[in-house]
Image (tube, rainbow, N blue to C red):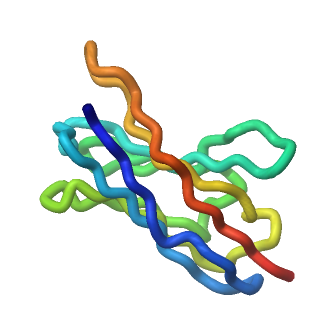
């Protein structure tokens, strides 16, 4: 069973930076599209960024130019570099592995990012 373990969350002041990491175990990682979602209190979970197996990234409009998603297939790890953080970026961030053929999607347990003003 595939497991995704996020790390790197924490408390940061507005304008600061954080890098989230998500390590996958027991995954054919290089073939999967990976993503980062977030859920703020009282709001629905939303897509932040995703990266295809070929390395193409897509971003929510709200984070374009500030966040960068990347992957290291040898380490089976996907990253989210978050710069110029804003209080509205405060949320639990979840790593996501998209469904691939008969293999179901997988979610990490989430890591909390808090941006203070």
From the image, which quarter does the N terminus lie in?
top left
Which quadrant of the view contains residue 14?
Answer: bottom right
Residue 32 location (% of width, % of height): 28, 37
From the image, which quarter does the C terminus lie in?
bottom right
Task: Compare residues 63 and 72 and report the one nearer the observer.
Answer: 72
Residue 37 location (% of width, % of height): 58, 46
Number of numbered discs on residues: 0
Tell me the residue at 82%/50% (across/down): 41
Q: Residue furthest top?
A: 102
Give the answer, above or below, for where 53 lies relative to 79: above
Give the answer, above or below, for where 102 lies relative to 116: above
Task: Compare residues 79 and 69 and report the one nearer the observer.
Answer: 79
Looking at the image, residue 28 sits to the left or right of residue 1; the answer is left
Tell me the residue at 23%/61% (across/down): 72
Looking at the image, residue 110 sits to the left or right of residue 73; the answer is right
Tell me the residue at 42%/51% (across/down): 57
Tell me the residue at 28%/49% (across/down): 24
Residue 73 location (% of width, % of height): 18, 55
Looking at the image, residue 36 sits to the left or right of residue 113; the answer is left
Task: Compare residues 64 and 10 and report the one nearer the observer.
Answer: 10
């Amino acid at each position: 069973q595939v497991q995704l373990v996020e790390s790197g969350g924490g408390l940061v002041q507005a304008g600061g930076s954080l890098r989230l990491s998500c390590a996958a175990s027991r995954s054919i990682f290089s073939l999967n599209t990976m993503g980062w979602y977030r859920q703020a209190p009282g709001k629905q979970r939303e897509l932040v960024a995703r990266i295809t197996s070929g390395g193409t990234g897509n971003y929510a409009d709200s984070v374009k130019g500030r966040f960068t998603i990347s992957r290291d297939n040898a380490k089976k790890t996907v990253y989210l570099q978050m710069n110029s953080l804003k209080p509205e970026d405060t949320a639990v961030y979840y790593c996501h592995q998209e469904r691939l053929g008969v293999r179901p999607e997988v979610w990490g347990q989430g890591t909390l990012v808090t941006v203070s003003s």
